[in-house]
Image (spheres, rainbow, N blue to C red):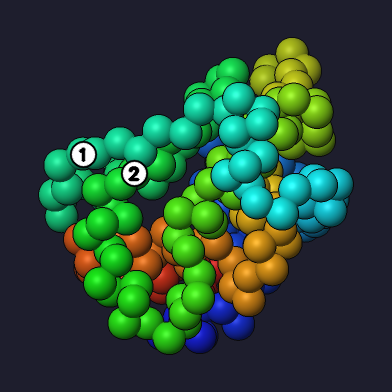
């Protein structure tokens, strides 16, 4: 997998993530780019406002629980949980995936000097911060019509876009953390990882 090429296509990641939202078709086309940019800026601003160099220490100070969990890894199961945030204050990281992917990641110059667990932690920490600070990404950003009724809804994909932006900004990464999703899955499910990479590269 060519991680250098994927890094150069950074602009597409927000588009891809937004396209995965179950309300994507309800979003007017002329609003999509603006929403993505708002989410990116929200993540960057949250990173700038966080006065903490060591996120592990920060989590300890904030009494955020960090749990490393294990699961059986099977190539036919593409829906692995890399990491997750559980309200009100728990972050879970998939130790099984980290362990399985470590030899592959160490062999990639692209990930040199990057601690994968730090990236996953940063991503999930954003979800804690957005709830604590009531940031843009947990508000209802979309208004749409269903028959005679006007509805308002939150676009969860914007939260993911902002979390990626937060992790990239806070850790000063030369690539979007979206690439990590592919790298962690590649040793277990290479075909699926390659398919996902192709979708990222061709998204309009």
Q: How would you rate the neighbour count of disc 1 (Cα within 10 Å): few for under 14, some for 14-19, many for 20 or more? A: few
Circle 2 crowding by C-alpha within 10 Å: few under 14, some 14–19, many from 20: some
- The answer to which of 152 and 97 lies nearer the viewer is 97
Of all residues, the one furthest to the top in this rendering is 149
Residue found at x 50% / y 76%: 113
Nearer to me, 138 or 132: 132
Total count of labels: 2
Residue 146 coordinates in the image, percent (x, y): 67, 20
Where the N terminus falls, by quadrant? bottom left
Using residue 143 as the reference point, say whether residue 54 is left or right of it.
Answer: left
Q: Position of residue 100 (x, y in %)?
A: 22, 59
The mark found on residue 128 in the picture is: none
Quarter where residue 136 is shown = top right
Q: Nearer the viewer, residue 33 or 67?
A: 67
Do the numbered discs 1 and 2 sit on residues whose CB atoms are within 8 Å? yes
Q: Secondary structure at mark 2?
A: strand
From the viewer's perspective, is residue 141 above or below residue 184?
above
Query: Secondary structure beneath disc 1?
Result: loop
Q: Is residue 157 left or right of residue 34?
A: left
Expressed as whole percent of the image width and height from the top left, the position of residue 30 reads 81, 53
Q: Which residue is mark 1?
A: 71
**x, y (%) of residue 164?**
62, 54
In the rendered structure, which disc, 1 or 2, sits on the residue that comes first in sequence?
1
Residue 156 appearing in the image: no
Residue in front for this viewpoint, 126 or 192: 126
Q: Is residue 173 above or below residue 134?
A: below
Residue ID for mark 2: 94
Instruction: Say which quadrant the C terminus sits in.
Output: bottom right
The residue that appears at 45% across and 54% down in the rendered structure is 117
């Amino acid at each position: 997998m060519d991680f250098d090429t994927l890094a150069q296509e950074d602009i597409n990641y927000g588009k891809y993530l937004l396209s995965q939202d179950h309300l994507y078709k309800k979003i007017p086309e002329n609003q999509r780019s603006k929403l993505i940019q708002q989410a990116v800026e929200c993540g960057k601003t949250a990173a700038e406002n966080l006065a903490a160099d060591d996120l592990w220490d920060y989590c300890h100070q904030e009494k955020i629980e960090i749990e490393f969990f294990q699961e059986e890894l099977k190539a036919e199961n593409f829906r692995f949980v890399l990491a997750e945030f559980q309200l009100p204050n728990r972050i879970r990281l998939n130790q099984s995936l980290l362990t399985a992917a470590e030899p592959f990641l160490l062999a990639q110059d692209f990930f040199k000097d990057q601690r994968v667990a730090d990236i996953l932690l940063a991503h999930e920490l954003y979800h804690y911060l957005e709830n604590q600070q009531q940031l843009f990404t947990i508000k209802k950003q979309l208004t749409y019509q269903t028959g005679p009724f006007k509805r308002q809804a939150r676009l969860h994909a914007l939260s993911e876009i902002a979390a990626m932006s937060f992790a990239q900004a806070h850790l000063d990464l030369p690539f979007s953390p979206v690439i990590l999703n592919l790298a962690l899955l590649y040793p277990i499910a290479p075909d699926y990882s390659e398919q996902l990479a192709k979708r990222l590269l061709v998204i309009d």
